[in-house]
Image: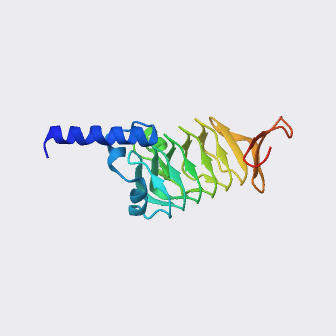
Amino acid sequence: MKRDDIAQLYCELREETARKWDRVLPVGELLVDRWEKAAFLNFGEKTSIYDSSIVMGNVSVGKETWIGPGTLLDGTGGQLCIGDHCDISAGVQIYTHDTVRRCLSGGRAAVEKGDVFIGNNCYIAPMSLIARGVRIGSCCVVAAHSFVKDSFEDYSIIAGIPAVQIGEVRIEGEQVRLVYFGQGESGEEYGGKG
């Protein structure tokens, strides 16, 4: 295949994607089936992962989870386990190791390692970073640009650098409420009848 043929194919795929999905994507995203990539990685049924996502080491992901573009899932220092029905948004980085002490000691200290667990039904917002050894319970929200270095229980709303719990998720049937500390019962509502 000649360069001109490849360029023509790219243009056709770009136009088709823009027309069908109203988006313009990098060439890798046009060529790779996100669900096939997830199946290749032995992730759960109906899970998808963008081509621009990096997966290293021992990573498991449940069913119907969406892993956005530009993410990094690092299971090289331990197991990284993400549950069912999660969204791992664009630019999220999750690590099972860090090299801070090794670097600062001139290589004398060991690389620090720790498993990371993210429960079911979690939303990890864009550009968040989750450090080694963290456990995030089910039905949690991690706000955008958060640095999560501690573990949190089910139904937590987590935000900040370093992240702290700023509220809780309340679910009753189809009704989902995000209640922020200091705002009483007047948190945002999602789904169901208001």
Q: In the picture provided, is 9 more to the left or to the right than 67? A: left
Q: Which residue lies furthest to the left in this view?
A: 2
Q: In this view, does 144 lie above or below 141?
A: above
Q: In which quarter of the image is residue 12?
A: top left
- Give the image's coloring scheme: rainbow
Q: In the picture provided, is 37 more to the left or to the right than 82? A: left
Q: In this view, does 189 lie above or below 114?
A: above
Foreground of the two, 46 or 113: 46
Relative image position of residue 154 (x, y in whole percent): 71, 54
Relative image position of residue 181 (x, y in whole percent): 80, 38
Q: In which quarter of the image is residue 14?
A: top left
Q: Give the number of callouts.
A: 0
Foreground of the two, 115 or 12: 12
Residue 194 visible to an observer of this rendering: yes
Residue 106 visible to an observer of this rendering: no
- Identity of the residue drawn at 60% across and 37% down: 146
Quadrant of the rendering where the C terminus is positioned: top right
Relative image position of residue 72 (x, y in whole percent): 45, 46
Q: Quadrant of residue 40?
A: bottom left
- Identity of the residue drawn at 38% across and 48% down: 51
- Identity of the residue drawn at 39% across and 57% down: 37
Q: In the picture provided, is 33 more to the left or to the right than 184? A: left
Foreground of the two, 97 or 190: 190
Relative image position of residue 161 (x, y in whole percent): 62, 34
